[in-house]
Amino acid sequence: MPEQNAGSTAETPPRRATTFDDLPLHPRLRRGVKEMGYLEPTDIQRDTIPAAVGGRDLIGTAQTGTGKTAAFLLPLLERLLGGPRGRIRALVVTPTRELALQAQEFLKVLGRHADLRSIAVYGGVGMIDQERALRGGVEIVVATPGRLLDHMRRGYVDFRELQVLVLDEADRMLDMGFLPDVRRILASLPRRRQTLLFSATMPKEVIQLAREFLTDPKTVQVGETTAAAVGVSHLALPVPAHRKSDLLKALLEDATMTSVLVFTRTKHRADRVARQLSDGRIDVGVIHGNRSQSQRVTALTKFREGRHRVLVATDLAARGIDVEGVSHVVNYDLPEVPEAYIHRVGRTARASRRGDAFSLVSPDEENDLRAIERHLNVTIPRARLPGFDYDRAAPPAPAGGRREPRSRPTGRGRSYPPRGGGYRRR
Ligand code: AMP
């Protein structure tokens, strides 16, 4: 493990002991909760479920890893239990198909005894099966915005009886340019309905959306909106760009890194890192926007089942990945925006389990690291991996070819290694 220059790990404060039995949930749903393996509600579930079951609009500021999915699915199921079947009465809009699939998987277990049907509607696969299911009568639709609009335009999606709308990861929908689509969807939904909006951060566009489309919402906030998941310990490992791949391999010699998500900035770099790891005989999968849906599902399944020890991903592809027991997140490249750092490290320490997040920081990424520190209001300790040869020169570029590309095209920043040696905590 890297030697840390200085460290700080957040402690989870003791919580009041509320059980699921104290929450206003039908015994049929509590059975689902039990089968999901949940022993007691998370903070967001404690705060959200009573208000949402009571029918109130709600804004939940919570990132992935807090148990937010069950926090909106359980009240949604509770509210639908008593009413008619065969009509769409709840809609969950998520930014990615992975999130949509995750929500639907949760619905299958949590709602197993509720006699409610759900369908996940997302792009990248044929429309026919989805159309058939939509026509066939389901009570819950989980959808990504673009594909849902495609179906809506064809005229067979009937939202007249919609009671509950959930907008999940609204900030991400904004980042991905989906807000216009979301507005279009919202415009064609009945005005009398309950709306639950979840977002890890609250940019002004999301606040504006909430103002327009929610009525007297209760606000539920879990932790600081800028705080990365509690329980994650963060380390930055400064390294020259051309030594990143060897440093990653050296880190992976540690047997405690059992299930590792590696993030790169581009699809190209994701492929390259995956290739380098598999050359080093490490079981690795890769997911990014150029991979087909079935390739992504296969890679995710193998990672989930432990057949891939490492999954290399870009930010968009990794959105919504829900894998139990991710031991480490490695930022092979720092993300372009600090918010993405929170989303990435939220993959580990899910629901308060402890995890580690390592960032490999080349000299030209120092400014990005500082931006993340400012955003999180923390100092991320710098560390060095003992015994690793940081100073080995870059291999000569192949004739006419390129060396390992920089993590960003413009070379700015400081020389490496920094004068004075070592890495000090700021
Ligand atoms: P989410 O924030 O919804 O992505 O959930 C993160 C992870 O926490 C998922 O693996 C959930 O299955 C898990 N989880 C959600 N609620 C609970 C709970 N009450 N107890 C234990 N794990 C939970």
Image: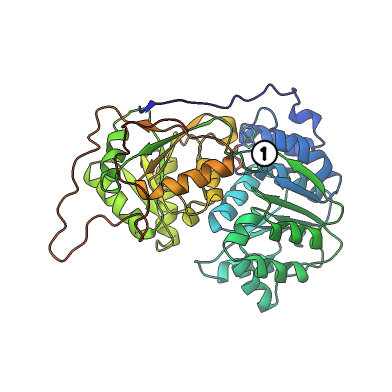
Q: Which kind of residue does numbered mark 1 sit on?
A: Glu
The response on whether ligand 1 sits within 8 Å of label 1 is: no
Give the position of the N terminus as an image quadrant: top left
Q: Where is 253 relative to 186, above or below?
A: above
Q: Quadrant of ligand 1?
A: top right
Q: Quadrant of residue 4?
A: top left
Residue 238: percent from left, percent from top: 36, 39
Quick one: 139 or 322, which is closer to the camera? Answer: 322
Q: Where is 372 relative to 177, above or below?
A: above
Q: Tell me which colouring the rendered structure shows.
A: rainbow
Q: How many marks?
A: 1
Label 1 Cα crowd, 10 Å radius (few <14 / some 14-19 / many 20+): few
State the residue at coordinates (68%, 21%): 14
Residue 63 seen in the current view: yes
Residue 294: percent from left, percent from top: 43, 59
Residue 322 seen in the current view: no
Quick one: 352 or 174, which is closer to the camera? Answer: 174
Residue on which the image places disc 1: 224
Query: Helix, strand, or loop for circle 1?
Result: loop
Using residue 400 as the reference point, say whether residue 130 is left or right of it.
right
Residue 231: percent from left, percent from top: 55, 30
Quick one: 345 or 54, which is closer to the camera? Answer: 345
Residue 307: percent from left, percent from top: 36, 40
State the residue at coordinates (63%, 57%): 94
- Residue sitting at the far front: 420
State the residue at coordinates (45%, 32%): 381
State the residue at coordinates (45%, 60%): 293
Using residue 338 as the reference point, say whether residue 111 is left or right of it.
right
Q: Where is 151 relative to 8, above or below?
A: below
